[in-house]
Image: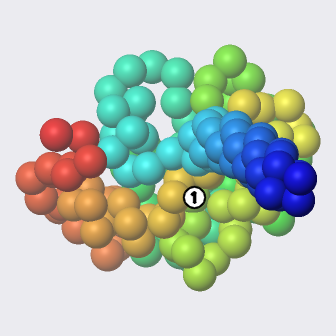
Amino acid sequence: MQYTTFVQNTFKSIGLVKYLIRVTMEDQLSFYQKKLDYEIDAWDLAEALKKAGTTIIDARSEAAFKTEHIPGALNIPHRTMNAETTAHISKDTLVVTYCDGIGCNASTKGAINMTRLGFRVKELMGGIDWWKRDGYATEGTNASEGQRITCGCQL
């Protein structure tokens, strides 16, 4: 009798664990999908720039932008983003904000500002630092030519 009760309770526990694992997996899937909804990597940005419909915004200072920036980027420091400074940007495009890299949150602040202004926004993972590490060219007084691009995750 005690053995039967033990087995029943054990199976109930296993059923609960399976339920919790299933919920956790669904939550994880949702989390990772949402990450892709809000972030973009250098490879995907470079591919998006080959087609119309993407605007890149460097959310750093004017001085940092002049030194080096992603080709085609607009410089709108996050502190200056408002309806006036963004009026020339179509709300039909995807806006990608970036900053120096993972140690800088100007791109996040810029993404918040642009979203509040009604734009569809993604944040460039790793900022200009990862853009350059992936071999892409930059413009500005400290421009780099870049190199042949190969992305291990895209092969």
Q: Which residue is mark 1?
A: 98
| Image position, residue 116 (x, y; %) | 90, 42
| Image position, residue 4 (x, y; %) | 83, 49
| Image position, residue 13 (x, y; %) | 81, 52
- What's the residue at 72%, 61% (across, down)? 108
From the viewer's side, name the closer residue of 14 and 18: 14
From the viewer's side, name the closer residue of 80 and 151: 151
Residue 51 in view in this figure: yes
Residue 95 in view in this figure: no
**Tally of marks:** 1
- Residue at the far left: name it: 148
Q: Amino acid at mark 1?
A: Tyr
* Res 46 → quadrant: top left
From the viewer's side, name the closer residue of 76 and 16: 16
Q: Tell me if mark 1 has few (under 14), some (14-19) or many (20+) residues whose alpha carbon lies within 10 angstroms of its own.
A: many
- Residue at the far front: name it: 1
* Res 105 → quadrant: bottom right
User: Against 148, is 22 above or below?
Assistant: above
From the viewer's side, name the closer residue of 136 and 21: 21
In the image: residue 32, left or right of residue 66: right
